[in-house]
Structure formats: structure tokens, C-alpha cells
Image: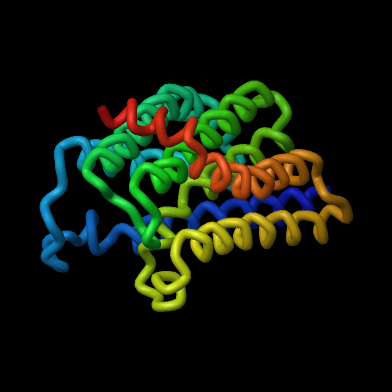
Amino acid sequence: MSDRLAVDRRLYLAASAVVALIMLVGFSRTYYLSSVFNAPPLSGLLHVHGFVMTLWFFVFLAQVGLVARKRADLHRRLGWIAVGLAPVVVVLGLLVAIAGGREGHTVGGLPPLVFMMIPMSIMVIFATLVALAIRYRRQPAIHKRLMLIASVNMITPAIFRLPLKFIAAGGPKVAIGLTIAILLACAGYDTIRNRKLHPAFGWGIGLLIVSFPIRFALAGTDGWLHFAAWLVG
């Protein structure tokens, strides 16, 4: 049992480090190293959003690290910071998505209001998964898996910005596919080590996979386009 717990801790520590690294590399040219790459200046909203998102992923990494070091006491204390930070992440993410729709931002040739569905739905799913993770905070096996899925769900925009030609050529669908691949790799490794698929991974990742075609279908409907147009004013 102790060996299995040690392997679990290494899995989540490695996964959280990879997620943080993807965020850093993906947004290095437009945010972290913007002056080096002569990127266009960012608005105040984007700066605050970038700071809060960075803080979230480092809190997530720190939380996993504390568990790996068997400091559950500090993990619980820092957890309340994460609880307070999560709503800020969601609100800022939604505001950035609306601002992007207003300014006509898009990727992969999608109409801006259609593309708006992607970042907004990421925030909705993140909020749902984090809320459930908080609900099951006294059941670590469920809690940690939901938090991992919630955080990996957030890195799709960073994956799309990785300096790799096949990602740029493939558009959002390739970035989404890689996001799912990361989650499936975590779930697959976890399943092999524990000799069964944990239900939290099963329905959590299943919910995420099923949501993608639904999101793309809804994004082109008149109802969504009218709602998005109302949001951007």
C-alpha cells in the first residue's frame, strides 16, 4: 500500500509539473517573455488574468508537492487559498473571453463569436470540477483526480500556443486532442498501477470528452450566437 501511494504521489507531481511547464512555454511568447519576442502590449485585464492563472497553477503544483512530502496540514491550509482563488480564475477567464469576442479574437479561422464558446466553456467546466473537488475534499482519491482534470482542462489555450507546426496547422481540435491525450495518459497509468479505472477519472474525463462535440455543436446555433452577441455588446 505504501509503495502504491508513493507511485500515486509521483504521478500527480509529474502531471502537475508538466501542466505548469506547458503553461509557461505556451504563453512565453505572448506573456512571460513578451518583451523578448516583441509581442504586442497586453491590456490591464490580460495582465491580471495572466497573473491569476499563473498563481493558480503554482498553487496547484505546490499542493501536489505538499502531499508528496506528506505535509497534509499545510496542504489543507493552502487549500483554502485555492478555494478563494478559483472563483477569481473563473470570473477573469469569462471576462477575457468576452473581451476577446468583442475585439474579434479567434484561432483556426473560426468566427469570433463561435470561438468564444471554447474559452467560456473551459471556465464553466473548470468551475464545475473544482466545486465537486471541494465537495469531496475529505475523500482524497476523488478530490485529487478531479483537481487534476480541472487543471489539465485549462491548458488547451497554452497547448495551442506551443511553437509546434502541427499544432498551429491543426487548429483548436489538435489542441483539444492533446489535452484529452494528457488526461488519458494520466488515467491509463493510474489504472495500470491500481488495476482498475477510478470512477472519478472515468466520469470526469468522460464528461470532458463528451462535452467537446456538444460545445462545437452549440457554438454554431442561433441561440448561442445571439447570447454571445449580447455579451460582447
Q: Position of residue 190 (x, y in %)?
A: 75, 55
Query: Which residue is pictured at 54% across the width and 47% down the height?
Result: 216
Pick whichever, 49 or 24, lies toward us: 49
Would you place residue 153 above or below residue 172 in this image? above
Say left or right for 205 vs 17.
right
Q: How is the image coloured?
A: rainbow
- Looking at this view, name the residue that lies furthest to the bottom: 165
Which residue is more in the foreground, 207 or 83?
207
Residue for point 31% across, 58% down: 27
Q: Position of residue 57 (x, y in %)?
A: 42, 45
Residue 57 visible to an observer of this rendering: no
Q: Quadrant of residue 232?
A: top left
For residue 122, side relative to residue 138 (left or right): left
Location of residue 108 (image quadrant):
bottom left
Residue farthest front in this picture: 222
Quadrant location, the C terminus: top left
Does 196 sit left or right of 71 as displayed?
Answer: right
Residue 108 in sight in this render: yes
For this rendering, which residue is in front, 71 or 222? Answer: 222
- Relative horizontal placement of residue 112, taking residue 37 as reference (left or right): right
* Residue 4 image position (x, y, % from top left): 78, 53
Q: Position of residue 218 (x, y in %)?
A: 55, 40
Number of marks drawn? 0
Q: Residue at x 46, y 59 (%)?
A: 172
Residue depicted at x 36% and y 36%: 93
Q: Is residue 1 above or below residue 136?
A: below
Q: Is residue 114 above or below residue 107?
A: above
